[in-house]
Amino acid sequence: MISTMRWILVFLTVAAQAADFQLAALSLTPEPWNKAANYAKFEKFARQARSQGADLIVAPEGFLEGYVGNQGRTPDLNWDRYYEVSEPLDGPWLVKVRTLAIELKANLMLGFAERRGKEVFNSVVMFSAAGVKLIHYSKTHTMNDEPLNTKGDSFPVVDTDFGKMGTLICFDRQVPETARILALKGARLLLVPAWGSSGEMNDVMMRVRAYENNVWLAFVHPDRALIIDPSGKIVAQNTTRGDQIVLTRVSIPEIAKPGLLRFRRPALYGDLIR
């Protein structure tokens, strides 16, 4: 009886410490090269999502400039025009995103072509409700179809008011080691802004990534939005094509339920890096 009561008290304590928040995936299609129009659309839908209670709002990959850095989307892509449309972290349109986050008192994530010195990266940034840069990640894996982008080389996991989070961008998710690294570093929620490949196989892949790593996962694409819990269940998704908000409540307890990772035997995995 005493042990049962102790278990109940532990459960109630953990439940009380759970991070409980509204997550909004903005399934929106941007205009190529038109940062003004794309920011206006982002602001419109971010305001609407916030009015519906969203605390964390995520837009797709490359949304600010319209994901023009991919050869398939922009066959006549050239360096001068691409570099010109790119934006440094303190550039004018990202300052607007930061200011909007403060005004709305919400966490905002946006994908953009990031100018960093003489290079351009396919990046995302998240600003907190206080305007603090929480997440800054650059895409690490491509299918060699982004010839003007420099690839990132790190997988940051950050502490937020909602728990630890990590980010992948589009094709990053198709390499299983990327999500696994974030999970092993303590991420409880993976945010995956994307552009390509959003069919049935992608839905299955995203459910598996959530399940095998015991994490929440949000896939945010112009034509598809999925929010998936650690059991691999889709808890929210878009139901039609076209611009829309997919919104759901996410609850991340301070102490996670044990997942499959505890059965790993890393000492046997040397072949993975040879």
Image: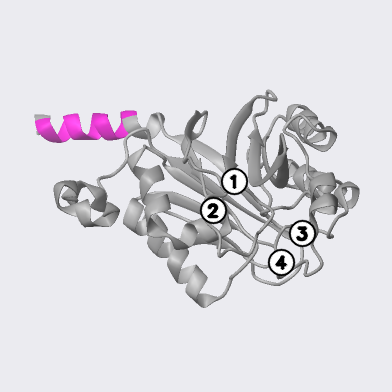
Which quadrant would the N terminus be assigned to in this image? Answer: top left
Point out the tag, 1 or 3, that comes first from the N-terminus.
Answer: 1
Spatial CA span between label 2 and label 1: 9 Å
Amino acid of disc 2: Ala
Which quadrant would the C terminus be assigned to in this image? Answer: bottom left
Residue 147, visible in the rendered structure? yes
How many numbered marks does the figure carry? 4
Of tags 2 and 4, the one toward the viewer is 4
Point out the tag, 2 or 3, that comes first from the N-terminus.
Answer: 3
The residue at which mark 4 appears reads as 71
Say which residue appears at 20% left-offset and 51% top-offset: 270
Highlighted magenta segment, given as a residue range:
3-13
Q: Secondary structure at mark 3?
A: loop
Mark 2 and mark 1 residues within 8 Å of each other at the beta carbon: yes
Residue 146 location (% of width, % of height): 65, 59
Point out the tag, 2 or 4, that comes first from the N-terminus.
Answer: 4
Local crowd size for mark 3, using a 10 Å CA cut-off: few (<14), some (14–19), many (≥20): many
Amino acid of disc 3: Val
Residue 228 location (% of width, % of height): 47, 57
From the image, give the main secondary structure of the stretch colored magenta: helix
Mark 4 and mark 3 residues within 8 Å of each other at the beta carbon: no
The residue at which mark 2 appears reads as 218
Circle number at residue 68 = 3
Spatial CA span between label 1 and label 4: 32 Å
The residue at which mark 1 appears reads as 23
- Residue 127 vs 243, above or below: the answer is above
Say which residue appears at 72% left-offset and 47% top-offset: 113
Residue 5: say if magenta. Answer: yes
- Residue 262 vs 125, above or below: the answer is below
